[in-house]
Structure formats: C-alpha cells, structure tokens
Image (cartoon, helix red, strand yellow):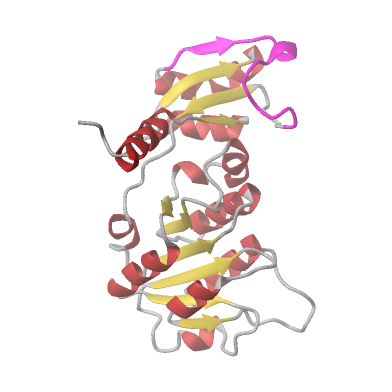
Amino acid sequence: MKKPKWVVAKEQARKAAASETVWLFGLHAVRDALMNPKRHKVRLIVTLNAKDKLDEAIATAGIEAEIVDPRKFNAPLDPSSVHQGAALEVKPLEWGGLAENCIGQERPRVLMLDRVTDPHNVGAILRSAEVLGASAVIGTRHHSAPETGALAKTASGALERQPYLRVRNLADAIVELQNMGFVVLGLDGEAEETIETALQGRLDRPVALVLGAEGPGLRQKTKETVDQLVKIDAAGGFGSLNVSNAAAIALYASQQR
C-alpha cells in the first residue's frame, strides 16, 4: 500500500532534521561546545595555534582534531566568519519542551521572541538571559534565528547553557505558559503601562516577556494572546531600543521587587 504524500513528507522532514548539522566557529564558541557533554560533536577543524589553545577542551570531548594550514582553512564557513582557526561541526541541541524548561525555578522568567531573525540579536539575548537567570528563550521554528555559528559566537558560550526552544506556534506556546500560571507580557512602545506597574503585586508569579522584531514589532495575533501589553519606561521620545537591549532591560525590570 502506497503511503500518503503527507506521511512521506513528514518522514523526509524527520530524516532531514536528524542529519542536520551546524558549524560553530571561534575559540570561545568551539571551546564551550567541546566542553558541553550534551552536545553531539561531528568534526573539528583547527590550526595548530588554535589546537594548542583548545587542548584541554579537545581532550575532554574525546574528539580527534583535523589540523590544517591557516592559509587553507577548509571548514565550510562564510568567508567573513572570524573563526580564529577553529571550527566544530555539531548537531543542534535538544532542550525538550516548555514544561521541563520553564518551571521549577523560584520566580521563573522566560523570554519569547516573535519573528526575531537576526542571529546576532538572538545571540546577545541568550547571553543576557543566562546572566540574568532566565529559564529559557523561546522562538519559533520558522521566521526565527536557528542555531548558527554567528549566533553561537555572539552568545559567547550561552548557547551551550541557556535553553533556546523553538516552537511551532508562538501563540500556542503563550497559552501553554498561561496555563502553567505565567503572566505573559508583550513589549509594545505604544502601551500605556510599564513592566514595573503591570507586575505590581505579581512579582512572585512566573513571568514571560514577549518581544518582536525591530520595526514590525509584535504580530497582531501575539498582541491578542498575551495578558497585557507593556512598555519600557523611557526618559523621552528619542527612538527605540535594539531588541537585544530591550530584552535585557525588560528581564531585569521584571525581577525587581
């Protein structure tokens, strides 16, 4: 019996995902990935100089390094990538679902990204999320930045430690968090209330902060699904913040008693 087309397509997508790999580059990103026992490592390409700097991490990972001439660095990277003589092919990390990552901490805080596609912004957000103690950063499978070398380098190691979940539908994920008891706030420059005023008397609740891409901001469906739209208190009408800066400020503001 012939399989339906949708079954074949699903199987092909599953096989493609299983074979997907990412090239990380730069000494810091490669070292942190090598030291991460949860990260499946496939291939390591280094110059002799980079190998000397990564020797301890290479030994910990138990991977054999391919040593290449700096002038013939043959990892499949964008020519503009600042690789510092180190590139590591890996499988994307599997963090699991919302419940296992977003609850369990005292006063959990989560960042949700609505079509934030720039890997440098997402990398910076992951770094801030790790420093400020967020439980997870949540994006979407489509129209959001996937794991890439550029994202990992900007995250400065946070990609290996900070859960970065990519869900099928952001509105459904918002509802799932609401059902777990989260207060879900959407960042919107036109909102009337600030984060601090919206959370008065609710700081002990789990909180999720939803940020949109610079320019378009939050989609209408997202605005309709969150509990409330809020803004970052600003000194004046001098323009808007970069989304990664806004994420860090919003996360900090949501934690202040």
Eyeballing the image, is 84 above or below 138? above
Q: Is residue 241 left or right of residue 38?
A: right
Towards the viewer: 215 or 82:
215
- Residue at 55%, 53% in the rendered image: 143
Q: Position of residue 23 (x, y in %)?
A: 55, 29
What is the number of callouts on the image?
0
Q: Position of residue 101 (x, y in %)?
A: 33, 56
* Quadrant hosting residue 168: bottom left
- Residue at 32%, 68% in the rendered image: 176
Eyeballing the image, is 37 above or below 124? above
Towards the viewer: 18 or 244:
18
Q: Is residue 135 left or right of residue 219?
A: left
Q: Position of residue 140 (x, y in %)?
A: 47, 55
Magenta highlight on residue 131: no
Report the residue that reaches farthest toward the front.
Answer: 1
Query: Which stretch did the figure color magenta?
Result: 63-80
